[in-house]
Image (cartoon, grey):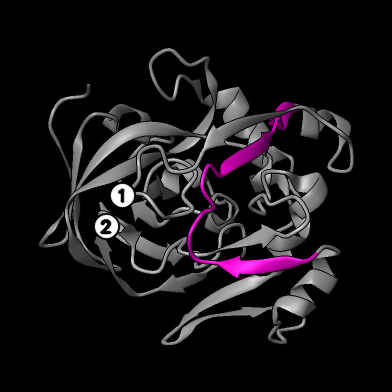
Amino acid sequence: MRVAALHRHPVKSLLGEEVPRARIDVHGLDGDRRRALLDLTTGRIASAKEPRSWRRLLTLRAESKDDGVRITGPDGAELDEAALGALLERPVRLIEQPPPGATLRRSVPEQVLAAGIDAEVEYTVQEFGRAAAPGSFFDFAPLHLVTTATLAGAPAARYRPNLVLDGDTEPFAENGWVGRDLHIGPDLRLRLIAATPRCAVPTLAHGDFPADPEALRRPARLNRVRPLAGMDPLPCLGVYAQILTPGTVEVGDRVTVHGDPA
C-alpha cells in the first residue's frame, strides 16, 4: 500500500485541508484538531455530530497559518469570531484547550436519518479523546485512517480521515488490522486500536458535496461491527490509531501491516 492523501482539520468539525507532507507524533498529525469553537451560550464544544444545531460548521473551512488558523465562509471570505457567530446564529469563541470536563454530544445517527436533520433526536455523551493525549479535540484517538477500497469512490472529506491509503485491499480490510502495527515511510509506526464508528456527519452536506444518506447506510449494511470489546455492533468505516514512533509522512510513502490481530 501507499499513502494516497493526507488531511488535516485545524478546527474541529470545520472543513480541512489536504497536505503533501506532515509530521505525526503522539498528538496526531501536526496542526490537526488543535482548535474548536466554543458555544458561549451553553459552554459546550460546537460539533457537527449535533447536525440540528451545528451542520453549518461544514460550510466553513479552516487552514493552518504560521500565526494560527484562518477560517473562511462559503464565499471564501475570512471570518472573525463576530462573523462566525452571525453565520452560526449563536456567539462562539475559538479556543485551543477543551474546558475542564468538556464532553461531546453525538446525535443518534439512525434517528437523524429517519427523522431528518432538523428533528429533535436522542444523543449520547462521551469524553473527548479517551485514547489521545490531553488537550486536543479528538473524538477518541489522535489518528484516523481509511483505504480507498473502503471509501469506494466516496469523497474522503465526508469521513474526515487523516490518512487515505491505496493498495490491493478489499473494502473494510481495516477491520482485520485492529491490534496490529502499521509502518509508514522510514519512521512512522502506528498501533491500530479500534474500528471507527460513524455518526451522522458523513451524510451531511460538506462544502460543495451535497447531503448523502448513503454515506451512513452503506457501512450500516456492509460493516456493522463492534468497535471495541463490550460495545454493540455499529456502522464502522476506517480505523483509529495511536502513535508508537513519530515520523514525517509524505504522499506516496510505502505502508506495511505487521503483527497478528488482537
- Pick the front one: 241 or 261: 241
Percent x, y for residue 161? Answer: 46, 53
Q: Which residues are magenta?
A: 91-110
- The answer to whether residue 99 is magenta is yes
Q: In the rendering, which numbered label is found on residue 167?
A: 1
Residue depicted at x 68% and y 86%? 78
Residue 97, percent across and down?
Answer: 48, 60
Q: Amino acid at mark 1?
A: Gly
Left/right of residue 89 with respect to residue 56 in the rendered view: right
Q: State which quadrant residue 62 falls in.
A: bottom right
Q: Residue furthest front?
A: 100
Task: State the SS at label 2.
Answer: strand
Q: What mark, if any, has residue 2 been given in the picture?
A: 2
> How much space separates mark 1 and mark 2, taking CA atoms?
6 Å
Residue 66 vertical position relative to residue 112 in the rendered view, above or below: below
Q: Secondary structure beneath disc 1?
A: loop
Q: Is residue 25 above or below residue 250?
A: above
